Amino acid sequence: NDAGTARAFLNQGSVTRGATENSTLCSFRTPCKRPESFPLDFTAVEGNMNNFMVQIKNLAQSLYPCSAQKLDHDMKLQFLKNVSVTCNDGSPAGYYIKESKGSKRWLLFLEGGWYCFNRQTCDSRYETMRELMSSTKWPQTRRGTGILSPQPEENPHWWNANMVFIPYCSSDVWSGTTPKTDHSDYAFMGSLIIKEVVNELLTKGLDNAKVLLLAGSSAGGTGVLVNVDHVAEQLQSQGYRGVQVRGLADSGWFLDNKQYKFTDCLDTISCAPTEAIKRGIRYWGGLMPESCRQAHVGEEWNCFFGYKVYPTLKSPVFVVQWLFDEAQLTVDNIHLTGQPVHEGQWRYIQTLGQELRSTLHTVQAMFAPACLSHELITRTHWMDIQVKGTSLPRALHCWDRSLQDNLHAPPVRGCPLHLIDSCPWPHCNPSCPTIRDQVTGQEMNSIQFLKHMGFDVQKMAQQQGMDPRKLLGMLNNGN
């Protein structure tokens, strides 16, 4: 138990700066000097985990020589050694990595970015979003944010893990198995890219890991649902049974619901998700989790929708999902352009929140705020959002603890895993991300935003059978 080790370590009362009692600090810039001792107050742990992590980081940095005080926090680009596994245009696929030699935890993150599902939509994507189909202009380094941040202040429980960011360049919701040939203009190899990255990481320490967390946002979040069991089976089949594989799916829990206005499948944005996926899965050679494929023989497209694939998964998965997801509203043809929405759209948006909420009932671990947004876990503000008084990093830490060796232990008090807002409107949770007026650029609070969108407090109160002042109070408090 890391906290227990830290407790024993810090309870010694002070920490000597230096590797051993008699060691001295030297570098080419500074003369050798005697070790310093400084007190570390362990009481901070009980009430303020963030403060504790800052102290630990300071301690870790103090154990380096002066000349190495500035640690390198960037993830560095590695192209896959297997050059037959490529991006859409045939350029090499790859990943960014920041190793943490002392850690047995690995976080692999799948980038998001929609998809294309036929020659026309993929040609259009190649013209306008080539960085999501080719590696030719990838930078040499990337800086992690949110759950990929190496800073304990921003990422209190995963900051010291081995971080791997896998850029999305296959346009297939991480499912494809089709190489580029003389007869096909594009490769779709998302599933094979993940498999190949895992194989390479086994030579870099993943073979000794305790936990592999496969995380992703948007199309990457759906990619987690589609691939987490594949990764677990890949490691088991190669004899690495000691690695616990888990999933963290952010903003990838889409509904195959009826669009607000039906449109033909002319482009990625307006095409209903069901129709786009039906076309895409054939075009990509999409590979589904075996248990889900067997449950939906001939209709494997169902496995891209969270509430259908989740019950078939063997690996534990934590779901992060805004109840009013902007990408879901976009494919449902609700475009919130800053103009007041009319009553039909309001009803549709509210119904969407109710439908999404109902699909999450069977999910054991989740975080679902009633906000209008998209993606969360790599945002720098990811610690600020709360559901029922609990932040997402805290909820993930609770989930982590619940999955540790003693699986039958009772839940820890004050450590909820099933966090979903009950208030029925977008941004009725006061901790939702800030929304700005698209015309003036001014920040809006929840009530200002709802009024701006055409929300009629008097009318809504009447419909709910309550006093308008009570409704305003509920909105202010996020109930």
Image: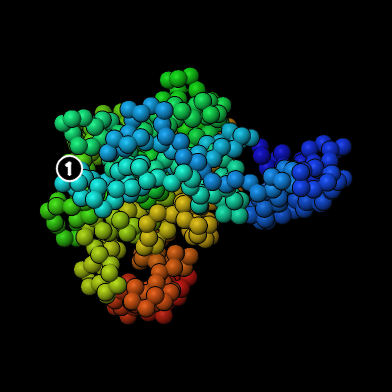
Q: In the current view of this chain or complex, which residue is farthest to the left?
A: 264
Q: Is the residue 293 above or below the residue 31 in the image?
A: above
Name above or below for residue 293 compared with residue 37: above
User: Is residue 107 among what the camera can see?
Assistant: no
Q: Position of 126 compared to 375: left or right?
A: left
- Taking 32 as reference, is 152 left or right? left
Please tell me in which quadrant of the rendered image residue 269 appears: bottom left
How many residues crowd mark 1 within 10 Å: few (<14), some (14–19), many (20+)?
A: some
Q: Who is closer to the viewer here, 123 or 11?
A: 123
Residue at 26%, 30% in the rendered image: 179
Q: Secondary structure at mark 1?
A: loop
Residue 325, horizontal then vertical, whole percent: 34, 57
Residue at position x 13%, y 56% in the image: 263
Residue type beneath disc 1: Asn
Residue 339, picture quadrant: bottom left
The C terminus: image quadrant: bottom left
The image's colouring method is rainbow
12 shown above or below 269: above
Residue under the point 33% across and 76% down? 439
> Label 1: which residue?
118
Decide if residue 229 is on the left or right side of residue 201.
Answer: left
Observer-nearest of 145 and 368? 145
Can you name the residue that lies furthest to the front here?
Answer: 28
Q: Position of residue 66 (x, y in %)?
A: 74, 47
Q: Which residue sits at x=40%, y=45%?
A: 138
* 390 and 210: which is toward the camera: 210
Total labels: the figure holds 1
Q: Nearer the viewer, residue 439 or 7?
A: 439
Measured as percent of width and height from the top left, residue 358 is found at: 33, 52
Figure quadrant of the N terminus: top right
